[in-house]
Every structure is written in C-alpha cells, then in structure tokens.
Image (cartoon, helix red, strand yellow):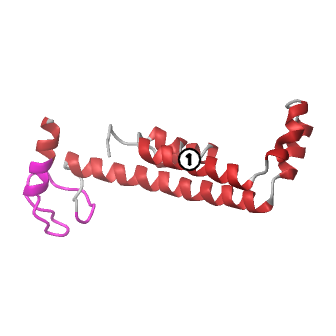
Amino acid sequence: MAETGRKRPWLAAVLAFLYPGLGHVYLREWLRAVLWFGLVYTTTTLLIDGNAMAPLQNGFTFENLLAAAQNVPLEASVAVLAITALNMVDAYWMATRGNVTTEVLEGTKCPSCGKELDDDIEFCHWCTTELDQYRTEADAEAEQ
C-alpha cells in the first residue's frame, strides 16, 4: 500500500458512497478501485434489464428519472445497496489501516499495541515490544 501521509477515513467512505471504488481512488488503491468499479458495473448489467432505462430516452428529466428508477427490480436495488455499503466499510477500513501503518513507520505509534511511543527508549513502555527491528525497517523504507 502506498502511503503519502494521513488520509481521512470519513472522506474515503463518503466518496465510496457516491460511487463504489471512488474512495479507493482517493486512497490510491488502484486495484481495489477497479475491482469495486467492476463489481458494481457487472451487478447492474446482470440484474437490470436494458428496457428499465427506456424512459430516459425521452429526455433526462426528473419525471423520466423517477419512472426509470421504478422499473429497477428490488433485487438489483438491494444488491447495489449492499455493494455500496461494503465498499464504504472497506474504504474506511483501508484509510484507517493506512494511517496506523504511517504512524508506525514514522515511529510515533507502537506496531504492537498502537499507543504513543517515547523517542528516548528502545521499547514500548505500554506493552514492552522491542522497537529496534521496526525502526530499522522504517529507516530502510525511508531510504528507498
């Protein structure tokens, strides 16, 4: 996962609500974004009949949009809603996990318990995890 600083989990979730996969684009999780885009596209293609959108051929008005929405089967609506909800949870979780990873690599949080670290000691004073191996990994990644 490519971190470029802290990300806002709530923003990733809101973008994922607007369109599944958009929150992952914000997080620069390209493969996940393409998979979510593909999943929602495939689901709508398979579950929604092409004739359901026929009212929109007469113009893109509110009445025509409402008529097209009424033509969408309940199964398709539930499936798209479930995909959107799962996508929002995944985007929020990925952003939160990325922030924790960034804090661990910066040396401000313990990789084991996640609590704040003291720079002067070589172990976490909360859970006694040795930090030498994590700090050398962070230094190696910083050099690349």
Residue 14, x across and y down, in percent: 58, 46
Above or below 31: residue 114: below
Position of residue 35 in the picture relative to residue 28 (left or right): right
Main secondary-structure element of the magenta-colored stretch: loop
Instruction: Give the quadrant of the C terminus.
Output: top left
Residue 34, x across and y down, in percent: 49, 43
Above or below 109: residue 7: above
Position of residue 109 in the picture relative to residue 22 (left or right): left
Q: Could you say which quadrant of the image residue 75 lies in? A: bottom right
Position of residue 115 in the picture relative to residue 44 (left or right): left
**Residue drawn at (42%, 52%) of the image:** 94
Residue 108, x across and y down, in percent: 22, 50
In magenta, the rendered stretch is 112-137
- Give SS at disc 1: helix
Q: Could you say which quadrant of the image residue 65 lies in? A: top right
**Residue drawn at (26%, 60%) of the image:** 115
Q: Which residue is mark 1?
A: 38
The amino acid type found where label 1 is placed reads: Gly
